[in-house]
Amino acid sequence: MLQRVSPVFSPRIHEHIAAVTARLAEADVTTPRLVPTREGAPYVDAGPAGLWRMLTHVEGVSFDAVSSARQARAAGALIARFHRAVDGMDHQFVGLRANVHDTGAHLAKLTDAVAAQGAHRLAADVRELARQIAVAASALPPLP
């Protein structure tokens, strides 16, 4: 599978992909793997066209929504296999996108953006959606 890498990611993301997928392969967990260029690089820098990478194909199917308890159990079992495989992994991950999992900061940015764009033609719809998100987020337990 050929992918254009989003510019939000540093090229160093490929170090982490390679380390995690190698660890998964060692644990006999099937995973796509980076396909190196002829020069051995994990991606191609195409200048203004961006960074591109190639990953091996893994046969199977994917789902947009869980359709049964059996499917949910299988998904949970796969996630558990992933976590067991990477537990104790010796790799120094470098924070490439600071605060990417800071839910509070994202919610604050949403509030600020909604307030700043009050004159937009879709402002009322966006305000209602933001309100629904805030209500749902308030029901979450504290997130570390």
Image: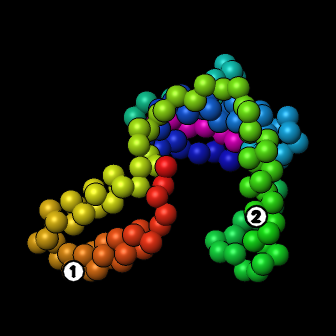
Q: Give the residue at x 80% y 69%.
A: 73
Residue type at numbered disc 1: Ala
In the figure, residue 68 lies in which quadrant?
bottom right
In the figure, residue 103 lies in which quadrant?
bottom left
Task: Specify start and end residues of the magenta stretch as a single range.
Answer: 49-56
Secondary structure at numbered mark 1? helix
Q: Give the residue at x 74% y 39%.
A: 86
Furthest residue toward top:
39
In the figure, residue 38 lies in which quadrant?
top right
* Rendered image: mark on residue 34: none
Residue type at numbered disc 2: Ala
Q: Earlier in the sequence, mark 1 or mark 2?
A: 2
Residues packed near mark 2 inside 10 Å, few (<14), some (14 to 19) or many (20 plus): few
* Rendered image: mark on residue 75: 2
Q: Is residue 50 magenta?
A: yes
Compared with residue 93, is residue 97 higher up or lower down, i.e. above or below?
A: below
Count of number-bearing discs: 2
- Residue 92: in sight, yes or no? yes
Q: Is residue 83 left or right of residue 121?
A: right
Furthest residue toward front:
142
Depth order, front residue of 67/121 = 67
Q: Give the residue at x 30% y 76%.
A: 131
